[in-house]
Image (cartoon, rainbow, N blue to C red):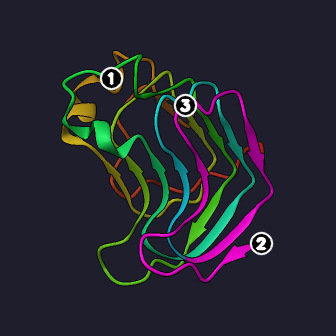
Amino acid sequence: YVHDLPGDGRGINTDVDGSWNHIHHNRVANVAIGYNDQMSGWGNRWEYNTVTNYRVYGMGFRLMDARLAQPSKASSSNGSIVRCNNIVGPVGDRAKALGVGAMMNGKFQSNNMPLIWISKNMQTYWSAQGNTWNGSSALPSKTPTLSSAGC
């Protein structure tokens, strides 16, 4: 249980090239970002995690690559599996349950993420780069419907 981190504290973070990890069944509260896939995270599985009272993002994936026209194999998240996470209780009206700067082959399934942010560039390549939301290649709404199928 990670909690009460001041400033820009991240509860659980994969650092540069942190790949093929299974981050699961964790609890994080009162942080800037609950879970963060920082740079070049390939194949990380984020499952059954909970974050409450997040100030910026509940979960973040390669936020720094938002400026890229396409995801980069040198820095963007690749092959992330994000399933059955419960992201609730944002602090203030600007916090988002999910933030994604750049990603390819990402699979989001059955997460409770009431408000999400996907970079403008990623919105243009979401489907073409193999990303899915609850099995659909369509870009999800900023306020996706909750589905707990398979959790």
Placement of 61 over or under 33, stated as above or below: above
Viewer-nearest of discs 3 and 1: 3
Report how many numbered discs are placed on residues in the image: 3
> Crowdedness of circle 3 by 10 Å Cα count: few (<14), some, many (20+)?
many
The residue labelled by disc 1 is: 71
SS class of the residue under badge 2?
A: loop
Residue 28 is a magenta residue: yes
Tag 2 or tag 3, which sits nearer the N-term?
2
The range drawn in magenta is: 1-30
**Residue 60: x, y in percent?**
46, 51
Residue type, mark 3 in image:
Gly
The amino acid type found where label 1 is placed reads Pro
Q: CA distance from mark 3 to mark 1?
A: 12 Å
Q: CA distance from mark 1 to mark 2?
A: 32 Å
Residue drawn at the location 45% of the way across and 18% of the way down: 130
Q: Nearer the viewer, residue 116 or 10?
A: 10
Residue wearing tag 3: 41
Residue that badge 2 annotates: 1
In this image, 1 relative to 122: left or right? right
Question: Is label 3 in contact with label 1 (beta carbons under 8 Å)?
Answer: no
* Image position of 4 with respect to 33: above or below: below
